[in-house]
Amino acid sequence: MLVAATTGLGGVGLIAAAIPFIESMQPSEAAKAAGAPVEVDIGALAPGQLLTVEWRRKPVWILHRSAPMLAALGGHRQLLADPDSSVEQQPRYAANPTRSLQADYFVVLAICTHLGCIPSYRPEAAPPDLGPEWPGGFYCPCHGSRFDLAGRVFKNVPAPRNLEVPAYRHLAPSRLLIGEDGAA
């Protein structure tokens, strides 16, 4: 009887000691939140305006493109290294000339594909410092890489690929969910 009681008590003690150890292997709430999708209100975003949010500790841009910005996307294909986004850097639904679900809203990781710098938003066409062929877009000041308003990289710059489009979806006309697209 003493052996059975000792064995039972030892088993209960082993289980009690193992529970906190096993729970410590689970990701913390902070770690779960860091990888979670981010819901963004875009209702107040005016055409031409850029909003920066954080998702997975990375900056994400949401650009509300105006009609002139959208019209300018087709006029410089010959200057682009990958105008058709043939390299898989976006979800299938964003493999189009605007690289977006809805043409007027562009969602992209704000990280240069060369060395990870954060480009500047330069929407004005043909500024003196970027030259007469500049249609507006994103300019990386670290090494001079250039991207158009659809995040497509120009030829002969250090960046090897277009800017990356994360998974996202529209929850409502004024709400986006970044990090989840609903595809199972």
Image: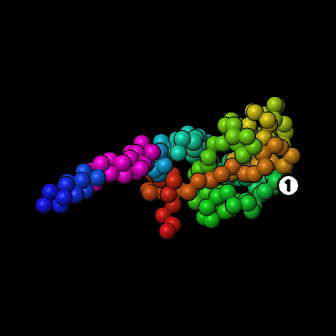
Q: Is residue 38 magenta?
A: no
Q: Please, which residue is most extreme toward the top here?
A: 129
- Residue 142 in the image, given as x and y percentages of width and height: 75, 33
Q: Quadrant of residue 115?
A: top right
Q: Nearer the viewer, residue 34 or 93?
A: 34
- Residue 73 in the image, given as x and y percentages of width and height: 73, 52
Question: Can you see residue 179?
Answer: yes
- Residue 60 in the image, given as x and y percentages of width and height: 57, 44
Q: Quadrant of residue 7?
A: bottom left
Label 1: element kind: helix
Mark 1 Cα-neighbour bin, 10 Å: few <14, some 14–19, many ≥20: few
- Residue to which mark 1 is pinned: 78
Q: How is the image coloured?
A: rainbow
From this view, report whether residue 56 is shown above or below residue 3. above
Side of 74 where 66 appears, left or right: left
Q: Looking at the rendering, in which quadrant would you find the N terminus?
A: bottom left
- Residue 77 in the image, given as x and y percentages of width and height: 81, 55
Considering the whole magenta stretch, tell me its main secondary structure.
Answer: helix
Q: Residue at x 46, y 50 (%)?
A: 36
Side of 62 where 151 appears, left or right: right
Q: Identity of the amino acid at label 1?
A: Gln
Q: Nearer the viewer, residue 46 or 172?
A: 172
Q: Nearer the viewer, residue 83 or 158?
A: 158
State which region is magenta. 15-31
Q: Please, which residue is most extreme toward the front here?
A: 2
Side of 40 where 150 appears, left or right: right
